Image (cartoon, rainbow, N blue to C red):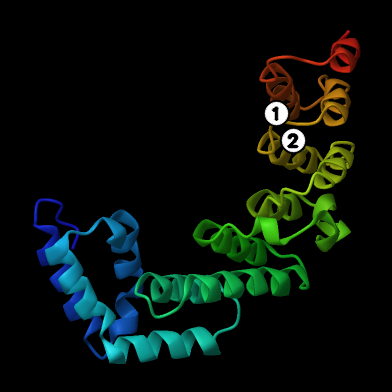
Amino acid sequence: MYDDGAPLVDRLRVVRDLMAREAALSFVPTVEAFLARHDPAAFGAEERTVFAEVQASAGAREQVVRLVEQLDTSTLRIELAHLAERFGWMTPEDFRGLAVDGVRQLLARTLTSELVDVTCEITKHEAVGDAFHSADLPDGLFRRAEGLRLVTCLAPPDPALNARLLAALDDRDESVRAWAAYALSRRLPLDDATRVFLAHRAEDESAEVRERVRWMLRVEERPSEPLRQARR
C-alpha cells in the first residue's frame, strides 16, 4: 500500500483484501492514511471498479458503522466515521452532524488536554467552526492556554470572538497571551477596533506575543486613520 512505485489499482486491491478480513477494524488507520493520500474522486475507471468492491464489503461496513454508533466522542470515533463517509457508508451530512454534535458534547465537559486533542482532530476532518458562535464557548476557555488552543482549532468565524481573544491578551499568564495572539493571527483580516487594540499591545513583555502582534499589524496593507494614530 505504501509502495508509490506500484500501480494504484494494485494497491487498492490490497485495501479491498484487508477490508474483507474479519479483523478489518485493525486496518482502519492504515486505510485512512492511504485514502488521505489518494482521493477517490481522482480515481480512474479501473480504480473506481476496485474501490466499488471495497465499498461493497458488507462485513467491514457493519463493523465500522456499528462501532461509530457505540463509541463516545473520541479520536477513534471521528476517524472511523470519516472512513465510513469516504466509503459512502455514511452521508456527508450525517458525518458533519456527528462532528458538530461531538464538539458540542466536548464543550460541555471539563477542559483537559485530551479533550482539546479530540476537538482539534474533529476539525481536521470536518471544519465545523461555522456551526458555533462566540456565545457557545465557555468563559473558561479564554483563561487557559489549552482552552485557547481549542478555540484556535474550532475557529468560529463569529466577529464577537475577537473581543474575547483581545481580553485574553491582558492575562498575566504568558502562555494564555501567546495562544490568544496566535488565535487572532488566524482570523485576518481584522476589523479596525481589533487592530487599534493590538497596536496598544505591540510592546508586550513576552517576545513571542510581541512579535505575533507586530506581525499582525504589519500584514495590514492599508492601515486606517485610527490605527495610524494608535501606532503613533
In the figure, is residue 226 to the left or right of 217? right
Residue 181 shows which numbered tag? 2
When asked about the image quadrant of residue 72, the answer is: bottom right
- Say which of marks 1 and 2 sits in front: 2
Q: Is residue 65 above or below residue 182?
A: below
- Mark 1 highlights which residue? 208
- In this view, the residue in front, 175 or 37, is 37
SS for dot 1 = helix
Q: Quarter holding the C terminus?
A: top right
In the figure, is residue 104 to the left or right of 169? left
- In this view, the residue in front, 5 or 205, is 5
Q: Residue at x 65, y 61 (%)?
A: 116
In the figure, is residue 232 to the left or right of 86? right
**Where is residue 220 shown, x and y percent of the image?**
70, 19
**Where is residue 98 shown, x and y percent of the image?**
59, 75
Q: Upstream in the sequence, badge 1 or badge 2?
A: 2
Q: Is residue 163 above or below residue 4?
A: above
Total residue callouts: 2
Discs 1, 2 touching: Cβ within 8 Å? yes
Going by the numbered disc 2, the residue's amino acid type is Ala
SS for dot 2 = helix
**Where is residue 136 shown, x and y percent of the image?**
81, 62
The residue at the far top in this view is 232
**Where is residue 95 shown, x and y percent of the image?**
52, 73
Q: Residue at x 63, y 60 (%)?
A: 128
Going by the numbered disc 1, the residue's amino acid type is Glu
Is residue 189 visible in this depiction of the protein?
A: yes
Is residue 39 visible in this depiction of the protein?
A: no
Q: Quarter holding the N terminus?
A: bottom left
When asked about the image quadrant of residue 8, the answer is: bottom left
